[in-house]
Image (cartoon, grey):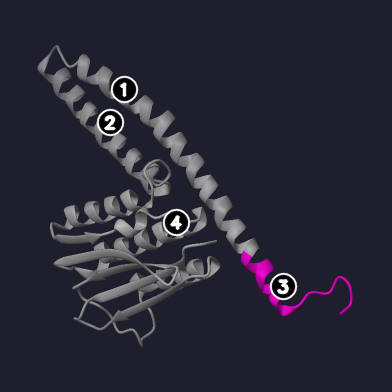
Amino acid sequence: MWVGMTTGKDDKALRRRLAWRLIAVQEEQRLRLSRELHDDLGQMLASVALELHIVRDGSHEMDARLARAAMLVDRLSARVHDAAWSLRPADLDRLGLRASVEDLASVLCGQLGIQCEMDLEALSSPLPAEVALTLYRIAQEALTNIGKHAAPSRVSVTAHIQDDRMRLTIEDDGRGFDSGAEPGPGHLGLAGMRERLALVGGKLSVETAKGKGTTLYADAPLAG
């Protein structure tokens, strides 16, 4: 083989490295924006809200206007917090993958008012940073889709280790969909999940049918 020539395998490995580097850059930008939203804008909003609550005294009309302003600032502050969390949750870096996925599932089930079953002890095991981040994003996308489209009465999120691989399973008893049909707006994220898992040597599989709920399996290697 001539010096400087590359094989198809080399090209594939290079493409995977470049794709993962692009994802890493995007995550770094998410982290920076999340911190700016939380630390700078969030703190300023909190200060404004405090001032508004303090000066709520005087005429009835002024008091009502200040109460309205304080309520709007409180709402905006909550929105900023949610936006910062969705960009890059602090728990993922501070508490780890297990706590972050548990939080995702708890928030969703709390919003829907449904039963949530969790067994995520396996996610406490050490994982390469890129694998942990990938599994978190898979859980985030899957649970978001459940909240938007599935209308379930129960959600289950579990993880276990087998043959040096981590399997994250997310199941709901909602509407389901026809896996053989062209993906609708709620299922376009499946292709992105598959691609992202493939970058870390993982695999995504889905079992679903109309009216039968959906089970998503995300497998990823424990070692980088």
Extreme residue toward the top, this view: 58
Please state the extent of the stretch shown in magenta in the rendering.
1-16
Q: Which residue is mark 4?
A: 132
Q: Are marks 2 and 1 in contact (CB under 8 Å)?
A: yes
The type of residue carrying mark 4 is Ala
- Alpha carbon distance from label 3 to label 4: 26 Å
Q: Are marks 4 and 1 in contact (CB under 8 Å)?
A: no
- Alpha carbon distance from label 4 to label 1: 37 Å
- Relative image position of residue 132 (x, y in whole percent): 44, 56
Say few, some or many: other residues with alpha carbon within 10 Å of mark 4 (under 14 / 14 to 19 / 20 or more): some
Toward which corner of the image does residue 167 lie, by quadrant? bottom left
The type of residue carrying mark 1 is Val
Which corner quadrant holds the C terminus? bottom right
Q: Which of the marked residues, 2 or 1, is nearer the chain's N terminus?
A: 1
Q: Which residue is mark 2?
A: 73
Between 218 and 192, which is closer to the camera in this rendering?
A: 218
Q: Which residue is mark 3?
A: 10
Q: Is residue 213 left or right of residue 32?
A: left
Q: Which of the marked residues, 1 or 3, is nearer the chain's N terminus?
A: 3
Q: Residue at x 23, y 27 (%)?
A: 69
